[in-house]
Image: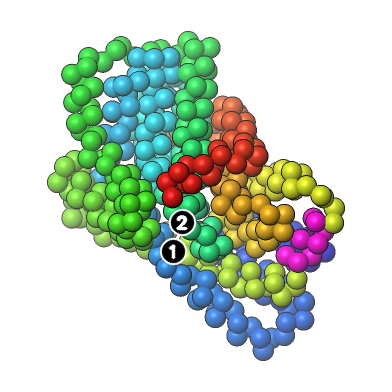
Amino acid sequence: MIMLFIFAGVLLLMLIGVTTAATMGFMSVVTFLLAGGGFERLILLPQRMYAQVSGITLMSIPFFLLMGNFMNVGGVSGSLFGFGRACLGHRWGGLSNAAIAACMIMAAMSGSAAACAAGIGMIAIGEMTKSGYSRPFCCATIAAGGALGPIIPPSITLILYAGLTQTSVNSLFAAGIVPGVFLGLGFMAWSSWVSYKNNYAKADPVPWIERVEAFRKAFLALLTPVIVIGGMFGGIFTATEAAAAASFYVMILGFFVYRTLHLRDLPKIFWDTVEQTAKVMFVIATAGFFQYVLLFTHIPQQAIAFMTGSFTSFIPVILLIIGILILMGCFMEGTAILLITVPIFVPIAKAFGYDIVQLGIVMCVSLAIGVLTPPVGLNLYVMASITGEKVMAIARHAVGYVLLMMLCAVMCAFIEPFTLLLGRMIS
């Protein structure tokens, strides 16, 4: 009953426009007092908020946000799309494939869905529409490509999950590679089929010398994922150090290679990063007290008892988890959902002996679907703001991509090697 009250309250407050952090903080305090916590024990609120954001793992988040801001201003996304267009533009759906490929690489740099969609969208939309692509389809394709940001490492969602569950970041990053690449290739195949069906124009083949030149321009940008992922798996960097090093590297590219970044841009970039970090960290901080309230009211223990008593297998439980996450993603932002559900779902998975790393990838993919589903689909609104298209028109063209992501979530849930084999090979 208490859990139903919390979910109903959170949903109602967010639907009327209350911010995520304020919603979680308010509902945590109200639930704590109604459960008999007492006003004098609210001193735990600032303590739990501070403890939640003081972990070393979460320190990488501002650096990844900074790197994403540097990329959007520093010309990196343009070079990536240019390289993809040179290699893939002559195929059916070639430009859409190029946009998705560029999003995959951007995802391996920034870890943010909105950053991927905005960075590639501002470059690719014009090229695609000039070649005869439907504008809503262009928007849906790039929105779907941006949804790979929270899945392909480094992912801010996975970093947050690691901090909440004390799981290895490297293990989660390794587990996210195969599902992320699978989804990227699946998106390419779907966009090619749609392009063939609708007879969207193909670009003329690009001579090999131009492809080599496009690769040369994009080469230094392509090294960014190597710095992040290779440095972490090679034991050179922690997640935070890798993010800081990559941010500095992307800044150098913007200043001295692409020369689209100037000193006058730095104050805005740094301020945007501070603002974004404050928003994310405030939500995470309020979640610290929310988790304490869940433990105080014994909700995780009650959920475990109900699930283990109702089901003898974890199969219906994981399907229920996926369904809940997808449904919540239609109405709430993914970070808030993760912070609310992890303290409940993780103990349930442990009770059934389910791998916590695998659960993290299942939750990550399921939550990423939310950026493509109205009424709160973040990437739909990002593309609508860039192009002026109607959100629902973009959402209709995104249905195929959503179905692919649902399939991937189920595969992650039931095919263990799909998520865990690569990590075991690396370790």
- Which residue is at a point 46% across and 72% down the rendered structure image? 54
- Which residue is at a point 30% across and 11% down the rendered structure image? 204
Q: Quick one: SS at disc 2?
A: helix
| Residue 231 locus on image (x, y percent) | 31, 52
Q: What range of the chain is rendered magenta?
A: 299-308
| Residue 377 locus on image (x, y percent) | 57, 43
Residue 27 horizontal side relative to residue 130, left or right: right
Identify the main secondary structure in magenta: helix
| Residue 427 locus on image (x, y percent) | 44, 50
Residue sticking out furthest to the bottom? 40
Mark before the other along the chain sequence, 1 or 2: 1
**Within 10 Å of the Cα at label 2, are there few (<14), some (14-19), or many (20+) other Cα atoms?**
many
* Alpha carbon distance from label 1 to label 2: 8 Å
Q: Does the CB distance between marks 1 and 2 fall below 8 Å?
A: yes
- Which residue is at a point 33% across and 56% down the rendered structure image? 235
| Residue 317 locus on image (x, y percent) | 74, 48
| Vertical placement of residue 419 versus 142, above or below | below
Residue 97 horizontal side relative to residue 220, left or right: right
Amino acid identity at mark 2? Val
Q: Which residue is mark 1?
A: 57
- Which residue is at a point 59% across and 79% down the rendered structure image? 45
| Vertical placement of residue 394 versus 88, above or below | below
Q: Which residue is mark 2?
A: 169
